[in-house]
Image (tube, rainbow, N blue to C red):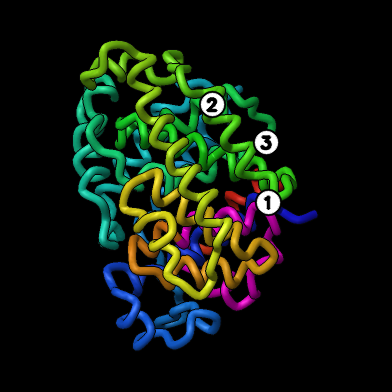
Amino acid sequence: MKRAATGALLGLAIGDAMGFPTEFNDMAQIAAKCGPWRTMPLPVASGRAYVTDDTQMTLALGEGLVEALAAGSLTAERMEPPVRTRFVEWSRSPENNRALGMTCLQACEALSHDGVWQAASQVSSKGCGANMRVAPVGLIPGLDDRRRSGAAQLQSALTHGHPTALAASDLTAYAIWLLAEGADPAELLSALRDHALRSRTVYRADWLGDLAEYAHDPDRESFIARGWNECLAVLDRLETALAAADPEADPCLATGEGWIAEEAFATGLYCFLMLPEEPQAVVRRAAYSSGDSDSIAALAGAFAGAYHGADAWPGEWARDIEYRDRLLALGAAWDE
């Protein structure tokens, strides 16, 4: 049993920890700090490999989903209250001190007050803070495409309501699910493009409510199509990059620095698809990058872990990662 959920969650946290010290560094600074990329170590201090808000929010989402699923099949009405509560708890935690994003903080502050969640959503932000945490949605057993898509978009919309953030989160969760199910990496890009085209004008009102009315598009279809159009464009860029892939070059030069949702998705996936049979090299290459290194490597690690399972990661890496017990408990709940 490959334990795809455990592999994906550990991979996300490992990539996050590996990219934590390299974020905001250029390639020369990373080389001076870490040496060659293929031997880049997992940074450990006082017996722990520390992660960022990427892993913290992934756990908040995953544990909120477990609570929602305990009440029955996943719906927006069951999902929103526990996930909202955990996001707010994360925002107020003393451990929330890891180069966190302002969009998440602003949205969580608004979510902490009474009122509809749509009013708290930051509809102008497509930062990567939504899709870096969405992996748990792709790991829930038994979800159909409609509910997986809706849940991925809703968890994004609680903080990042820009349509590209919604679409990129949806694509990320779909990729995680495909890889956990054993999809051939060589066929992944085509499957993702098909999903984007099918979804392009589908506004999931049963999950998003009236979110689109908080933006300035002429109608709901135009709102959601704007996000999928940007994701389709980055899939084109990813396809071009893979045709001339160079594992020795900074991946951000190929598909973007990852500060925005569609680029974080594309660059994390680029690192995985360049080296699909080398999961440890995937997270090293992603972390050894000039952009949003922790989020890119977290996504790359989730892709590699979903595909290869828990055995992808060295025992000492899994042993030393921060929040190990919570990651393993969440993975075990869905691997069983």
Q: What quarter of the picture does the N terminus occupy?
A: bottom right
What x and y, as percent, mark residue 285? 50, 70
In the figure, is residue 252 to the left or right of 177? left
Q: Look at discs 2 and 3 and give the one toward the viewer.
A: 2
Q: Within the magenta stretch, is there residue 178? A: no
Give me the residue at 30% from left, 74% from top: 26
* Residue 202 can be seen in this image: yes
Mark nearer the N terminus (2 vs 3): 3
Secondary element under disc 2, as helix, strand or loop, is helix
Earlier residue among tags 1 and 3: 3
Q: Residue at x 65, y 75 (%)?
A: 315
Q: Which mark is residue 185?
A: 1
Asked if the residue at tag 3 contacts the one at tag 1, i.e. Cβ–Cβ closer than 8 Å, the answer is no
User: Which residue in the structure is indicated by mark 2?
Assistant: 197
Q: Amino acid at mark 2?
A: Leu
Q: Is residue 298 magenta?
A: yes
At 35% from the left and 26% from the top, the residue drawn is 226
Residue type at numbered disc 1:
Pro
Measuring from the top left, give residue 55's x and y in whole percent. 43, 56
The label number, if any, that marks residue 141 in the structure image:
3
Q: Which residues are magenta?
A: 297-323
Task: Answer with the quarter of the image where residue 20 lies.
Answer: bottom left
Q: Nearer the viewer, residue 276 or 8?
A: 276
- Classed neighbour count for the residue bearing mark 2: other residues with Cα under 10 Å, few (<14), some (14–19), many (≥20): some
> What is the x, y in percent for residue 112?
23, 34
SS at mark 1 in the image: helix
Give left or right: position of 21 versus 103: right
Of helix, strand and loop, which one carries label 3? loop
As drawn, which residue projects farthest toward the right? 1
